[in-house]
Amino acid sequence: DLEFTSSSGLAVHLHFRPHPAMAAQPAAKAQKTSSEDTPGGGADPGLPVVHLLDYGAGNVRSVRNAIRALGYAIHDVESESDIAAAAVLVFPGVGSFGSAVEVLEARGWVEPLRAYCRAGRPFFGVCLGMQLLFESSEETPGAEGLGVIPGSVTHFRTAAGAEAAEATHDGNLQLTVPHIGWNGVAFGSDKAGSYVLDGVDGSSKVYFVHSFRVLQTPANADWTLTTTSYGGSEYVSSVQKGNVVAAQFHPEKSGATGLRVLGNFLSKHLGPGAASLPAVPAGAPTPAGGASVTLLAKRVIAALDVRSNDAGDLVVTKGDQYDVREAADGDGDKGAVRNLGKPVTLAQRYFEEGADEIVFLNITSFRQGVLDDAPMLKVLEKASENIFVPLTVGGGIRDYTDAAGRTWSALEVAARYFRAGADKVSIGSDAVYAAEKFRESGQKTGETSIEQIFHVYGRQAVVVSIDPQRVYVEKPDDAAAAAAGYTVVKAPVPNADGKQYCWYQATVKGGREARDIDAVQLAQACEELGAGELMINCINADGQGSGFELGLIQAVMDAVTIPVIASSGAGAPEHFTTAFNATPVQAALAAGMFHRKEVTIAEVKGHMAAAGVPVRG
């Protein structure tokens, strides 16, 4: 059980119960113990042991997998004495500052952690694990951090990004928050030789996902290991003083570069692990001393639509305007579900080919509960073992009642996904229902799936997938559309009647049911409720290979300040380059063209780089 108060004051109680579809043990405990861990939190003899502080929030499985991939065993911290006994302590903080502090206080770990770090003992904090080293955070006023490093954590200022974009006349500098994606790190002049960064140069990119950051000040300057640029300013992206190290980025999600950073730290204090440190791929040439300004790369995302076929096997499929079946035969029987491969195999291939992120969409989950779908959870667990880039999972994130009559909250469903290896969850139909209620009442209840997950895990953990369809109108100032507040844009192609304008109607249930809300209204409401990223699809463009729906993407980006992923319609490398050059969109996604090997991820990135679009190598 986990009980705490969220940053907004919401009382939260997470109780992990056994479920018929899972092993007969609590979900939280099932995920904290691996084949390498013995009962009681001990580790197999013979391997150097890392003490892992898992306080129960977010995707800690990926940190476990990264440590094991580097050849180390894990001992879970369960008491103050475990902290005192640790030769190396890794703290992968995920979620909100206040929630983490409250859990640490409830377990009596604040003072032992503070003493451990102040004594200069080997410590590696990740993301929130770095922020908690500071004195306080704007995310949760009144909550006290460990105070090991002087200063406070502050929120990114979106106005600063707008000023930077205006000053440089570069619309692609549009600052969206959270800061999500692959950015660089600039080495402090006196820290460039740090063992932590051995084998990493200024061209390397690492993965960030956060809304709050620490600005460099004279008081914390002696701690600053690297800085990163975003929105026209620089912030502290990693710290080190002696044996105490922490990173705002996620080494466990930063591919070979991240594993190298984490491995450098572990090998320094525990000796070499059972696996060799990974070599970091060479990037673009870097000026002597490293770059002082870093650049956020545009993300290329591979998506896998996953469902059971008629034989009950879990397969990756792809729709044509959301229809995933082959054409019916002459007898009128429905066609088979398109089978484009096995989920884990394809995901591994995309990681190795350089995908910046991988998305699993469980496209039939609206018919059942996620916790009834153990095979999908197993796919995620297996994929996360060897894939060290972000994983987003969507499908069925909602409150529901299972066959046994047990009611599960959306927060519990999301928690199960996170414990299985997801970094973010994608909400579809339930977000539409939540937005409709919010627009009607003008009030937040704290009970919607978006709000529940946002309050505990933070905005960066919540993606909303919007599935709209074109509704054509005669002219851009169509009276009916204007009266409803819909945003009308120039359609990419006219309809059969020659109409050249349209608005985008939101749908639910995999595009099967239209709703009286447009994509822009939906996006704005979801941002207000706590979404941190939007995946913008288009039913009309799905599977057509004619390019992304740029008018729709631009309309949404004009209306929100959170990152947007372009989805639906990609069929060639130039479609990605065009989307990034024509709009300030931060990421673009494709599925079928990658599954069928019509285009490779390397070809997409090569085309983007040749056109001057920043990419991760």
Image (cartoon, rainbow, N blue to C red):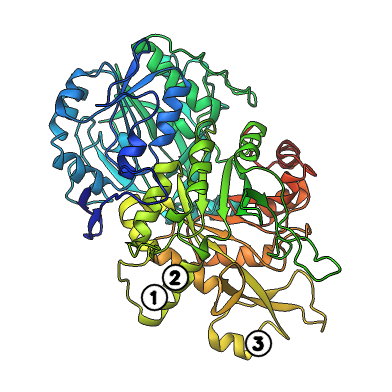
Q: Which mark is residue 204?
A: none
The residue indicated by pointer 3 is 478
> Callout 1, which amino acid?
Phe
Answer with the quarter of the image where residue 471 lies: bottom right
Earlier-in-chain disc, 1 versus 2: 1
Q: Position of residue 552 (x, y in %)?
A: 64, 67
Left or right of 113 in this view: 361: right
Q: Around disc 3, counting alpha carbons within 10 Å, would you say few (fewer than 14), some (14 to 19), or many (20 or more)?
A: some
> Callout 3, which amino acid?
Asp
Q: Position of residue 571 (x, y in %)?
A: 77, 52
What kind of element bears circle 3?
loop
Q: Are marks 3 and 1 in contact (CB under 8 Å)?
A: no
Q: CA distance from mark 1 to mark 2?
A: 7 Å
Q: Are marks 1 and 2 in contact (CB under 8 Å)?
A: yes
* Picture layout, residue 457 above or below residue 435: above
* Picture layout, residue 250 above or below residue 9: above
Left or right of 337 in this view: 230: left
Is residue 368 visible in the rendered structure shown here?
A: yes
Answer with the quarter of the image where residue 194 lies: top left
**Residue closer to the observer: 270 or 233:** 270
The residue indicated by pointer 1 is 438
